Image (cartoon, rainbow, N blue to C red):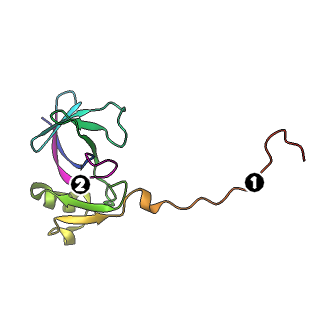
Amino acid sequence: MRTTIMYIEGKDDGLTGQGRIGRVRFSKTGKTIYYQDRELQSLKGFGFKANYFDVENRYGYWVSNCRKDGQDTLYPGVIEIDEDVREEYWLNIRELPEKISLTSFRSEGKYSRRKPQPEKPNRPAAGARR
């Protein structure tokens, strides 16, 4: 089975959950991922903030490739790194050898960097008379 290091976030509490960096194994078809003792099946695009679910307890998970900048979470949170991938993660994915001893880090999240949109001027509705 093919393996790779990925970001895995449990969604059993709703939009956010515990984020981890760990090694996953893929089934031959790639529709099932195995992580630790979990068997995660693809939601095939039908999940809300989740793309896989645990076949045993039906909890949702977000599984994605690790980002080089470490901002894997949607919202700010702490990401734990599994011990068996820690060195490989810091050296090969993040390319930050000085952080090789860290077992967790804080992600600011995708949505924490949103810039406010400028207000649009009020315009009369189409066909409205002045």
Q: At 17% across and 68% down in the image, what residue appears?
A: 102
Query: Can residue 122 be found in the magenta stretch?
Result: no
Q: What amino acid type should be assigned to the residue bearing mark 1?
A: Asn
Classify mark 2: residues with Cα within 10 Å, few (<14), some (14-19) or many (20+). some
Residue 2, image x and y in percent? 15, 37
Residue 98, image x and y in percent? 20, 72
Q: Earlier in the sequence, mark 2 or mark 1?
A: 2
Which quarter of the figure has residue 69?
bottom left
Q: Is residue 35 left or right of residue 106?
A: left
Q: At 28% across and 66% down in the image, what residue appears?
A: 106
Circle 1 is placed at which residue position?
Answer: 122
Circle 2 is placed at which residue position?
Answer: 18
Q: Is residue 42 left or right of residue 103?
A: right
Query: Can residue 24 be found in the magenta stretch?
Result: yes
- Whether residue 32 is situated above or below residue 22 in the rendered picture: above
Q: Secondary structure at mark 1?
A: loop
